[in-house]
Structure formats: C-alpha cells, structure tokens
Amino acid sequence: MHRAANVGFSLLVMAFFALIFFESRTYDERSRAFPMAIAAPMLLLSLYQVGRLSLALYRRVPEVTAASSNESLESSGQIDIDAATTRKRVINILLWMAGSFVLLWLIGFREGLPIFVFLYLWRESKDSLALSTTFGVATWLILHTFFGYFLHYPWPAPQIALLFGFDWPGIN
Amino acid sequence: MFEAAADGLVGLLDPFTLGLMVIGILIGLVVGLLPGLGGITAMVLMLPFTFDMTPIQAFSFLLGMFVVSSNAGELTSILFGVPGEGTTAATILDGHPMAKKGQAGRAMGASLASSGVGAVVGAITLAIALPIVRPLVLSFGAPELFALTILGVTFIASLSGGSLTRSILMGGMGFALATVGSSPQTGIYRFTFGAPYLLEGVQLVPVALGLFAIPEIIDLAVRRTSIAQADLGKVGGVIQGVKDAFTHRWLVVRSASLSAFIGLIPGLGSAAAQWMSYAHAVQSSPRQEEFGTGRVEGVLAPGASANAKEGGALIPTVAFGVPGSLAMAILLGAFQIVGLVPGPRMLTTHLDVTFSMVWILVIANFISIAFLALLLPQLVRLTKVKGLILVPIILAMVWLGAFSNQSNFGDLVLLAVAGAMGYAMVALDWPRPPLILGLVLGSLADKNLGIAYQRYHYDFFTDPAVVVILLIAAASLVYALVQNKRIARAKAGLSDLDKRAGGRDHA
C-alpha cells in the first residue's frame, strides 16, 4: 500500500516536471532557459524513480521502511490508532478545514475565525459550552482589539457582503 | 571606530528610546507568537508610526519588534511544528520532535540561548570582518551570486535524510515553483495558466505553513492527545537547553558567523541562512542519522542564525542602500521617513547611527530573551494541553498567517494545496526541507544566471571567484554524498541487527 502510494506520488511529481518542461517550450529562449534546465533532468530523474518503484512493486520486493529518515521520525511520539479510525479522523479534520475556509471566505476573518474556534471546540472537541464560548470570545477580542484597533489590519471584505452589495460593519 | 561604537550605544540608552524599544518588543512578541504573521508584517504595519521619531528611536522601535518576533517565531516552530515565519521552518525539523518527547523547554531554552549568543557573535564577526568583507561584497556581481546559490543547492544533499533521489526531486520542484510568475529576464509571465494570483509567483509563507503546519494539525487531530507524550519535568528542561548552547558553543559560533556572512551578501536572502546553518549542523555532526528525531544541535544552529543574519543584512542596507533581507527592505522605508540616506556615508559620517543599529540588535535581543524566558514555563505547559483544544486555535493562526502574506485568498488556496502535499510527503517519507530551500534559492539562481549570461555569456564560469565558490560547492556535495552512504550503511547495519534480534525472538 505504502509503495503503491509512493508510485502514485512519484507519478504526480513526474507529471509536474512534464508540465513545466512542455509549457516552457512555448516561451522565448531567454524565458524558457532556466525552467527547462531544471525540468529536463528532473523529468528524467522522476521517470527513473517511477520505474524503480514500479519494478519493485511488480516484483513484490520486501519494502524497506525509511523509518530512520528525517521525516518519518518526526512523529516519533505517535500512539497506536487503527487504520479505520485514523482515516475517519483525517477526513473529519479535512472537512473542518474546508468548512473553516468557506466560512472565512463568506463572512471574513474577523467574524469567521471566532465562530470556527467556538464551533470546533463545542462540536468536535466536545468541550463545555462555557469553555468554547470563552475561547470564541477571546479570539474575537484579539482580532478586534489587537489586529483591528491597534495594528489597523486590512481585513478583506467578506464575500457575502460583496455578493449582496451591502457594507460590512467596520470594513471599507 | 570605537568612539562611534560608544556614541551609538550612548544614543540608545536614552530612556524614551529604550521605552520605544520595549513597546516594539511587546508588539513583536504578540505578533511573533502568531504563526506565519511574523515581524515583517508587524514592521510594515507600524512603519507609519515612525514619522515623528528620531532615526535611533525609529530603529529601536522597528528592530526591537523584528528581533523579538524572530525569536518568538522559533518558539511556535518548536511548540506546534508551525513556522512562526516562513524563514523559521528549519527549527521545526528537530525542535518539534523534541517537544513531542516532552523536551519543549530544553528546545526553547537552547533556541533562545543560541539566538542571544548568535546575535552577539554575529555582530562581533561583522565588526572584525567588515574591513575585509566590504571590498569582497562590493565586488560580488551576478556570476558570484549565481555560484553562491549553487553552493546553497548542494546543501539539499545534507537535508535528504538518506533519500537523495527524492531530495533532489523535491529541490528541483522548489526551483521549478520559483520560476512561476514574471521572468526576471524578459518580464514574460510563466506558468500562470491564466490565474491572476500566480502573477506574483509562488509565495514562501503559505508554502512553508502548508508543508509543515497542516500535517502537524492533522496529526494532532488524529492523535487527540497533547503534543508532548512524555512528562515535562520540573522546569521543562529550559536550563538544560541553555547549557546545550554553551556545550555546543563552536556550532553556535560557526552558525552565527555563516549566517552573518550570508546576510551580508545582498540578495542571497535570510531564509537561506537558517537552512544552510541547519545543513551545516547536520554535515558537521558525527551522528547525522539522528537529525530530524530531536537533536538539540538541530535547534541550536537555526537559533544562532535567527538574529546573526540580520546583523549581516544590516551592512549592505545601510552602506549601499541594497537591502540584505526583506526586513531590511522595510527598514529602508524607515530611512526615508526619518530623513537618512543610505550609502557609504553611513560608514563614515553617520557611523554612530550604524553602530547604534548593531547595538539595538544586541540589546533588543537580550530584552526579548528576558521577556520570553518569563513566558517559557507557561509556553512549555501548552504542550500538555489537550490536542483538540489546540487544533482550532493553531488552524485559525495558520489561516491568518497565510492570508497576511499578501492579503489575498489565493494564499489560502496555496496553503491548502501545500498542506495536502505536505501530508502526503510525511506519510510517504519524502523530505520537505529541500522543496523550501529550492523555492528560496530558485528565483535568485534564475535572476543571476540570466544577468550573468547576458553580460558574460558562459565566460563567467572562468571567473576566479566563481571557480572557488563552485569548487567549495563540489567539495560540499562530495562530502554530503559520502556521509549519505555512511548513513545508509549504518541503517543497513541496524536493520541486520534487528533481523538477527527478531530471529532470536522467533527461535
């Protein structure tokens, strides 16, 4: 599974370099020189990587875990969680992230972030209403006072205000 | 020279000036603890407030703010695995694993101590090296800068974590991404695919936040435990971290000096300085295979670099009017506001003002360390807070940090894409640091290669300075490859031992 996913990722990397290489050809000589000089050898190297991994997958060579690489040991403090639960939780947090993005886009950062913090703590973290409200209000206060009042942070106009053509309080 | 240094210090010790520095430090402290936002954003937002200030007051206020945010940014990298600024991502590699092991206090103590020592060493190194380095820096043109980016690229091999092919591919991807946007040679927009957001190129901050912060947030949401799995100990190991900085004092000195020199070269970029310091720590360690698992040297080197590089960047900014880093570019704006003209006169007539800026970096650094030291015990406790409480707060800060980069929702989309990629890379053991280093160095290489080729064709490869730098790069690459093979052999040896132990267990 790990190796099959690695082949897939390597294919994506190869596709990226192929895109850079072929798109570069449409530019004039000076504009394309550097990207092509990068993309051409990288395309070959990624092809080699895909070939090597695919061959190992085909021959079912036992997988050597890269457990001692820099990256894999970053999460050395992990605890055992079964795959199904992990998958469910990953999908869950991705949905929360997507939801928070839509919220920020629709009603802006100043109001969207406190609502997101409150909702996540209350619904997902199952914290008490008092604690969730406290954190939500604290977020709102920081955004309004420190960023808004003190730093004069340039908040973007919320999409909902732009769509329906009305002024959002405190945002020009 | 000593008289000017003394005058610079006396001018700074005025109570009002020190008060402004402390206000700047307090603002920078709050901003610095918010991932992605960083001191540069704070400096931009606070620039208009310097209109009524004297030059030294304005620099105290702005540089104080910048120094503390740089230090605080290191702490968020350690605590949450979220880069405080795009340039502090190198600290995550060993700092965050230390936090997971319950050694957040030690990592933060080491980072602050090395940052303090680094600022002083950087300033001293500069003062000593300035007469020698000044003509060298002035003689650097596009060919030498291109050669230096090649030297930087060779560090990718040291950041590979044992997988050189993947590392080169990720470095190449960083380089390719750096070519998105306007061509420095012709002004033609490349690889924008009709998206207005890409006209400005691929931004470092959302990419660094996405690659490093999003996987950590997902990990925290999946584990549902606190960041630290082990006990924190009585004072969380802060004192041990400070001791580490002195135990590895030569690493701190070397990293600070290297970063001061990188900062000194206009256009090389301060983001590269931390990665190169980290790579130097890896290269110079006899236990390279343990980097990335929570080695304190992996925190000390980027920590020493944090402020040393800004000391270096100060020199071309004040002496030639060429900003050595993004923060220094904003500082140039302050020069105009307070009526100073950067140029050689800053090293003659206004040498006291130049020295006061060096003093500000040193003094502000120590004041900020004192403030942060007071906060450390509370910050360390954050690693024992339930993960699900931290998730929305960190995510909120990451969204805000990415957006602050350009005030563009495209940054959030880029953050999400980089986050997805970062998560896949962690899951599949692909190294992330080379991609960031490639992105940092790619645009510099593109620009300087273009200029060098236009002016000298390929003859610049025979320039003595270029030849020397490329030889150093080649030696660095060969050394890294030899070390990589050594690590691979060590891993194979460990694997054999595991198998034998497994065999005995089965028997």
Image (cartoon, coloured by chain):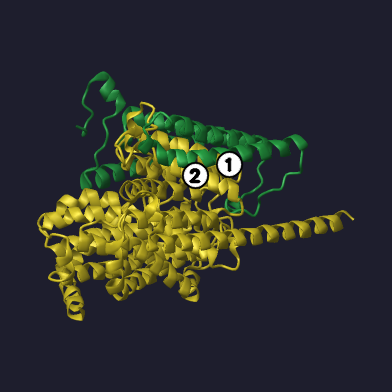
Chain colours: A green, B yellow
Q: Label 1 marks which chain's residue? A: A
B388 vs B475, nearest the viewer: B475
Is residue A99 rendered to the left or right of residue B367? right
B466 vs B418, nearest the viewer: B466
A153 vs B193, nearest the viewer: B193
Give percent across and percent down for residue B281: 50, 65
Is residue A157 rendered to the left or right of residue B472? left
Q: CA distance from mark 1 to mark 2?
A: 10 Å
Contact (Cβ within 8 Å) of mark 1 with mark 2 = yes
- Amino acid type of the residue that numbered disc 1 sits on in the rendered structure: Leu
Q: Local crowd at mark 1 within 10 Å, few (<14), some, or many (≥20)? A: some
Residue A45: numbered disc:
1
Residue A169: numbered disc:
none
Looking at the rendered structure, whether the residues under marks 1 and 2 are on a common chain is answered as no
B58 vs B444, nearest the viewer: B444
Q: Quadrant of the C terminus of chain B?
A: bottom right
- Indicate the quadrant where residue A31 lies: top left
Position of B2 relative to B219 (above/below): below
Q: Is residue B78 visible?
A: no
Question: Count the marks: how many?
Answer: 2
Residue drawn 47% across and 68% down?
A: B238
Q: Quadrant of the N terminus of chain B?
A: bottom left
Give percent across and percent down for residue A65: 69, 48
The residue identified by callout 2 is B172
Q: Is residue A53 visible?
A: yes
Q: Local crowd at mark 2 within 10 Å, few (<14), some, or many (≥20)? A: many
Position of B39 relative to B15 (above/below): above
Residue drawn 31% across and 63% down?
A: B264
- Amino acid type of the residue that numbered disc 2 sits on in the rendered structure: Gly
